[in-house]
Image: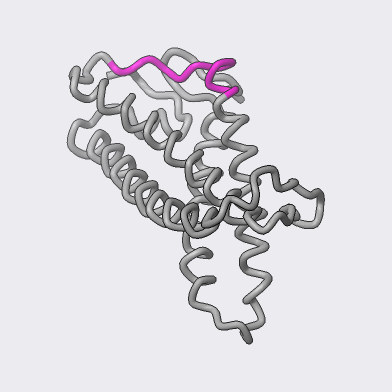
Amino acid sequence: MLLKNTSTRFGHISVLIHWLVALAVYGIFALGLWMVTLSYYDTWYHRAPELHKSIGIFIFMVMVIRVIWRFISPPPKPLASYSLFTRISSKLAHFTLYVVLFGILASGYLISTADGESISVFGWFELPATLTGQGIQADTAGVIHLYLAWIVVVLSLLHGLAALKHHFIDRDTTLKRMFGFNSDIK
């Protein structure tokens, strides 16, 4: 089992974190879309937002670990076959995904704590409110949260399509490396 990244492929920890965040982001996105349609009398009216907040804090913790892990175990080098455009757009896309994800998480925190209440994370611990009473904090953060959520979904879909393009059109090992498979370098 390869835990750390090598110069040619991703290790299992990077692969696990990548797909865990991807699944959690899509799950929390779907949950967010669903929970705003609930009426006050729905059973999940209060439970869905609590679950959404807890998953959001979990994603934040995993993303912090992910950033630290990138320093401990840098990602593989780009393939020699990548054009300059591919190298630059890849770095820009990854950086943008990170910034947007952290922006979503920060805005979600600001929405959830605007009233001064802490966030209960799965009932395991409480995350205190630090910035409250800023007037329209929840509304402003809510608009930012919504737009960033859609941006991360669109960007991640483009990210996935780019990986499929590399696999099926360019026929290189990009997608195999993303799954942590050992493959010949092209």
Q: Which residues are magenta?
A: 68-79
Query: Could you tell me which residue is drawn at 35 percent across and 34 percent down?
Result: 175
Of 173 and 18, nearer the camera is 18
Decide: is 64 above or below 107. above
Q: How many marks?
A: 0
Query: Could you tell me which residue is drawn at 65 percent across and 61 percent down?
Result: 51
Residue 130: in magenta span: no
Q: Is residue 62 rendered to the left or right of residue 8? A: right
Query: Could you tell me which residue is drawn at 55 percent across and 43 percent down?
Result: 106
On the image, the x and y values in percent for residue 81 come to: 21, 18
Decide: is 6 above or below 60. above
Decide: is 93 above or below 123. above
Of 27 and 50, nearer the camera is 50
Query: Could you tell me which residue is drawn at 36 percent across and 45 percent down?
Result: 156
On the image, the x and y values in percent for residue 128 come to: 75, 46
Rendered-image quadrant of the N terminus: top right
Rendered-image quadrant of the C terminus: top left
Of 128 and 32, nearer the camera is 128
Q: Is residue 140 rendered to the left or right of residue 163? A: right
Of 126 and 88, nearer the camera is 126
On the image, the x and y values in percent for residue 126 come to: 78, 49
Q: Residue furthest bottom?
A: 41
Identify the image quadrant of residue 179. top left
Residue 76: in magenta span: yes
Q: Residue furthest right?
A: 124
Q: Is residue 18 rendered to the left or right of residue 112? A: left
- What's the coloring here? one colour
On the image, the x and y values in percent for residue 181 come to: 45, 29
